[in-house]
Every structure is written in structure tokens, then in C-alpha cells.
């Protein structure tokens, strides 16, 4: 039986190595199973998953929906446009409305940090058992993306056994707009937990020096880091200082919508300094895989030619892996919890 202990999944800071192992192992099993049509898995039959997205999404919302349906859950999708938010209804009252309709899981995305955590806390105060899965909150956290990136890398390094140990001792370069990226933050927790060193690279305006200490202290309210020995985080400013050492490269979208001021002189200059292309990858000592969480600004953080090069670009693989990873999360949260409660 699983040792899973998370009722909500808000971020990855409290994940143990066993939690990562459980998610990756379940996702790997789900990935190898047919999960559509009449061959759906019955695990979440009679359960209701609601996607509550107050901010735009293509990948996360659709793959949570596909994941939930593959496990035979009922699914309701909320989108902010056209909802009663326009009449002044609050985020909390919107969430409570779906709880009243019977949601077992709310997958929540919001542009403000901590909205998922606040909803989880409010539901617990009201005695509600609905679980919150964070689909991305402001700059803070995007746990399902961190997990699918981890799985994609583990699967690349060890396709037969994509466990957390596949990352041990690897050097993963994360390039670009770290400051505004919840994906980078979730990857920092996940990759260092599995023993990878992370080489962060970007200009000071998008990568403040403090990121070097990112995983040194558990967040408020969490007393201990469950990981005994994490990988290290290094900061460099030039691609030539990270790419020669990298076992994999992850580049991030420039999050222009989250920039309070014009932090970049020109996009051309950024592409020249930090764009990942076949040319810049010549700095690597070997052939390395390239990841990007999407959506991609083609020709800015990554060239269109590289995005299309399936021999090294894992972006399509990341999208595909999003479904089994989200199935694993939904299964652990809704099916395992239901079994524990004898529902
Ligand atoms: N990577 C990611 O979160 O993509 P979406 O914004 O399309 O969900």
C-alpha cells in the first residue's frame, strides 16, 4: 500500500524521495496502459474533478481533463471568461460553488501566488474534504509541471527504470527567466531532491543571486525539509559557463506578462545571449536533450529549428508525459484517499 500522505498538492517543497518515486512509478505504469474509449481505468468512477482556471492554459488544463477522464472521473471545466466572476463573485465563493456541486478535486490555476494554498486552508476550516491540486499560482509553484519534467528527464536517462535515482549526479541547466518562473521553482525542488545539480543561467535582471539559496530553508509552516541531501544550485551568467557541463538543458519562456518593468533591452539581444539553438548547443560536450515547459516564444528562448528536432528536443515528450503524471496525482489524491476512507 502507498505511503502517500498529501491531501492537497500545493508545491513540491514537502515531497519526500518516496513521494517522487511513487508518482514516477505510477505515471510509468499509466503511460504503458491503454486509457481511452472502453479501456478507461475505473479508479475514479463516481468522482468529480473540476478544473478551476482563473488564468490561461492550454497544456495543464487539457491534460488534467484527459487524465481525469482516463481514470473514469466526471470532469467540469471552469474558465474565468463568461463566469460569474464578472458579476463580482470571489475566487473563494467560486471554489465553494463547485465544492457544493460535489467536486472531489479542484485543480486550481491563478495568476496570484498562494491562491491554491489559501483555498486549501479555507476548505479545511469549513470541514470540506475536497482536495486542491495546484495547476500554477503566480510565481510560486507548478507542481505537476515539475513532476512531468522530472519524469521526462528520468525516462531519458533511464528508460527502463525512470526512478528519481536516474537524476543522481546529473547536471541540469535551466536557462532564462528564472525570476518569473513557477516552473523553475518547482524544478529546483524536484531536481535537487533527486540528487541533480542545477546550473541556472540568465541575466541578473531575470536571475537574482538569491536563487543560489533557494532550497536551503523550508517554506513558512514547514518545519523540516524531508530530503536529507539535496543537489546544489549554481548561478552563471553566460551559456558558455553552463552548457559544457550540462547533461540536459531546460529553457524557459520569457514571462512578459509578469514583468513589472522592461527588464530586457531587446529580444534579439536576449536571443543572442541566451537563446538555445543548434549553434549554441555546440558548446555542450555531448548531445544533450532540450526541454521547455511551453508555450514557446519561437526565435526568442529557443529556435524553431530546434523545437522541431525530435532527436534532441523533448518538448513533445513533456506534453505527452503530462497526462500520465496528472493521472498519477489524481489517482494518489482521489482514489487512494477514497480507499483509505473506505468510500
Ligand atoms: N506549461 C504550462 O503550464 O502550459 P499551459 O500554460 O499551456 O498550461
Image: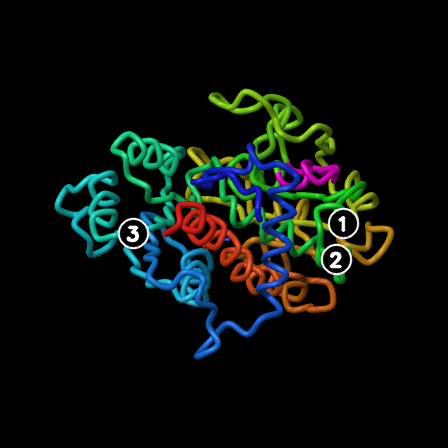
Pick whichever of labels 3 and 1 is earlier in the sequence. Answer: 3
Q: Is residue 173 located in the magenta-colored stretch of the structure?
A: no
Camera-near label (3 vs 1) is 3
Where on the picture, by quarter, is residue 199? top right
Q: Is mark 2 within 8 Å of ligand 1?
A: no
Q: Give me the disc on residue 103.
A: 3
Query: Badge 1 is on which residue?
Result: 166
Residue in the picture at 20% in, 56% down: 82
| SS type, badge 2 | loop
Residue 101 higher or lower than 174, as above or below? below
Query: Badge 2 is on which residue?
Result: 161
Q: Which residues are magenta?
A: 190-202
* Residues tagged 2 and 3 counted as in contact (Cβ below 8 A): no
Q: How many marks?
A: 3
Where on the picture, by quarter, is residue 236? top right
**How far across and down, in percent of the image, does residue 240 sit?**
79, 42
- Residue count near mark 1 (Cα–Cα under 10 Å), binned few <14, some 14–19, many ≥20: many
Amino acid at each position: 500500500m502507498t505511503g502517500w500522505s498529501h491531501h492537497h498538492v500545493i508545491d513540491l517543497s514537502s515531497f519526500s524521495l518516496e513521494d517522487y518515486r511513487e508518482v514516477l512509478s505510477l505515471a510509468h505504469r499509466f503511460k504503458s496502459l491503454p486509457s481511452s474509449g472502453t479501456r478507461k481505468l475505473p479508479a475514479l468512477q463516481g468522482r468529480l474533478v473540476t478544473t478551476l482556471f482563473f488564468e490561461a492554459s492550454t497544456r495543464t488544463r487539457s491534460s488534467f481533463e484527459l487524465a481525469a477522464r482516463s481514470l473514469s472521473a466526471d470532469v467540469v471545466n471552469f474558465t474565468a471568461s463568461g463566469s460569474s466572476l464578472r458579476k463580482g463573485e470571489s475566487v473563494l465563493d467560486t471554489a465553494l460553488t463547485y465544492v457544493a456541486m460535489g467536486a472531489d478535486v479542484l485543480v486550481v490555476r491563478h495568476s496570484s501566488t498562494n491562491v491554491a494554498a489559501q483555498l486549501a486552508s479555507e476548505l479545511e476550516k469549513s470541514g470540506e474534504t475536497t482536495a486542491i491540486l495546484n495547476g500554477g499560482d503566480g510565481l510560486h509553484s507548478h507542481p505537476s509541471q515539475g513532476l512531468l519534467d522530472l519524469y521526462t528527464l528520468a525516462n531519458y536517462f533511464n528508460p527502463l527504470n525512470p526512478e528519481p535515482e536516474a537524476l543522481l549526479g546529473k547536471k541540469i541547466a535551466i536557462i532564462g527567466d528564472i525570476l518569473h518562473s513557477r516552473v523553475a521553482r518547482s524544478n529546483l525542488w524536484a531536481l535537487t531532491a533527486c540528487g541533480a545539480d542545477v546550473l541556472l543561467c540568465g541575466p541578473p535582471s531575470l536571475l537574482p543571486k538569491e536563487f543560489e539559496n533557494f532550497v536551503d530553508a523550508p517554506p513558512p509552516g514547514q518545519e523540516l525539509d524531508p530530503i536529507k541531501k539535496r543537489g546544489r544550485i549554481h548561478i552563471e551568467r553566460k551559456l558558455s559557463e553552463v552548457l559544457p557541463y550540462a547533461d540536459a538543458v531546460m529553457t524557459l519562456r520569457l514571462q512578459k506578462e509578469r514583468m513589472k518593468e522592461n527588464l530586457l533591452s531587446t529580444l534579439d539581444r536576449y536571443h543572442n545571449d541566451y537563446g538555445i539553438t543548434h549553434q549554441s548547443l555546440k558548446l555542450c560536450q555531448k548531445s544533450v536533450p532540450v526541454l521547455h515547459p511551453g508555450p514557446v516564444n519561437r526565435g526568442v528562448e529557443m529556435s524553431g529549428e530546434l523545437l522541431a528536432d525530435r532527436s534532441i528536443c523533448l518538448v513533445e515528450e513533456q506534453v505527452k508525459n503530462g497526462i500520465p503524471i496528472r493521472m498519477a496525482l489524481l489517482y494518489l489524491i482521489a482514489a487512494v484517499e477514497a480507499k483509505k476512507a473506505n468510500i
